[in-house]
Amino acid sequence: MTYAKTIEYLYSQLPMFHRIGAAAYKADLDNTIALCGKLGNPEMKFRSIHIAGTNGKGSTSHFLASVLQEAGYKTGLFTSPHLKDFRERIKINGQMISKSEVTAFVEMHSVDFKDIQPSFFEWTFALAAWYFEKEKVDIAVIETGMGGRLDSTNVVKPIVTVITNIGLDHTQFLGNTLAKIAAEKAGIIKPGIPIVIGETHPETAPVFNQFAQKHQSEITFADQQVLLLNTNFTKHRPPLLSAEYESLAYSQLYKLFSPLSGKYQLKNLATVIIALEKLQAFGIKIQTGHIISGIRKTVKNTGLMGRWQTICKNPLTIADIGHNPDGIREVLEQIAITPHRKLHFVIGVVNDKDVAGMLSKLPKDATYYYCKADIPRGMDAAELEQLAKVHSLHGKAYKSVKDALSSAQKNAGTEDLVMAGGSAFVVAEVV
């Protein structure tokens, strides 16, 4: 079986949440446990860091993986969704799993697929665990797909657990309040394993404290333990991010430069600092120089895409995968500090998100280019245009993401900003 046919088989045979939505969701860990059992439980044979959160978990995962690489550790990285190539989901030291490994795994275990009938994500996690164990990684950074308690990744036994933040997303599965969603995310907290929470919120902090106490797990709120002393967004287009932090527990100063220049990365960096200090306490040898160089080289070391990513300089065109009200709010804060005359926003969404919540936050003086990503869950561009009119947003629907982007760039002046986002799947078609 060729790699192309292997991927075609997987897409056609296995439910895939990011394409079809709720029909692919499995509300238990039975399939994952069965798959891992057939593989000899590889997920138990390497050290891991487990990361959940509504927003920021992808950037945080890549920051941590890059620092661990700089410290000399053979580092696995499991993330989702992919933007261009399925193999982006599974990397070791920044290198994607080979096509031959993917094909070999499918050929070896196709019978297991029929017996267990896993979802696409369940299968993908099983592949990652098998590959990381086979390649003898020193440590793996494992990002949850959705939620936590019932996420396929929740079979790992990490040495540190991280929850970046909580926002209203996937409410049909995780609950319609921040406290309910926090309880689902807190499901990754393990007995005796330190837990790092990125942001303190009055509705979610009591939930996390309750879970930590129940499991006798040391809990640290990163925003209470790291002081942000200085930040600088240079006047380049786009601005570059530098930040200076002080860790209260270690009386340590960190002056960091991040190639991920979004203002929202300041929160993620604080979370990363505390997570790394917990790893150091566990015995993972990470020096301050590794942290500085790892953050600086995050994109180079891991190949991360889609986080305030410049895809064209004239006109300045930036893509960001923010895809819920909180994510859009963070994107808009970054737009506000990016020099520009007029904003041209290429936007597409998926139909199971809080679309009204996102549209209500968008600026009314921008020009919008509505589009539909090439996935079944994508909202029709004309429908999105009509919904946007309710929020006094003005623009036009286009037949494809590329057409929308081309029109936006053609209409933009030299001092204007073109933004592409609303969904990771829109970004996937432009980066």
Image (spheres, rainbow, N blue to C red):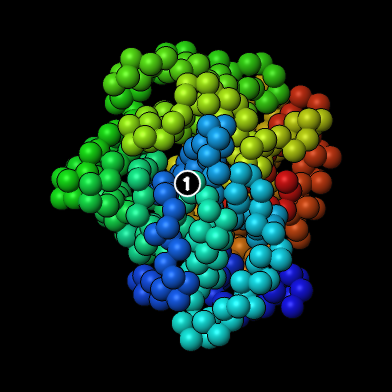
Q: As displayed, is residue 24 above or below residue 264?
A: below
Q: Nearer the viewer, residue 214 or 130?
A: 130
Q: Where is residue 86 in the image (x, y as percent from the top left)?
A: 65, 60
What residue is drawn where x is 75% and y is 58%?
A: 400
Q: Nearer the viewer, residue 268 or 401?
A: 268
Identify the secondary structure beneath mark 1.
Answer: strand
Q: Which of 222 and 124 is in front in this view?
A: 124
Residue designated by label 1: 139
Q: Which of the 4 image quadrants contains residue 153? A: bottom left
Q: Position of residue 198 (x, y in %)?
A: 36, 36
Answer with left or right where residue 66 lies relative to residue 103.
Answer: left
The amino acid type, in three-letter code, at marker 1 is Ile
Residue furthest to the right? 410
What residue is drawn where x is 47% and y is 21%?
A: 288
What residue is drawn where x is 55% and y is 60%?
A: 134
Q: Position of residue 373 (x, y in %)?
A: 67, 59
Q: Decide: few, some or many residues near mark 1? Use Cα within 10 Å; few <14, some 14-19, many ≥20.
A: many
What residue is drawn where x is 54% and y is 45%?
A: 75
Q: Which of the 4 image quadrants contains residue 365? A: top right
Q: Where is residue 263 in the image (x, y as percent from the top left)?
A: 52, 28
Q: As displayed, is residue 344 above or below residue 171?
A: above
Q: Is residue 388 visible?
A: no
Q: Which of 372 and 155 is in front in this view?
A: 155
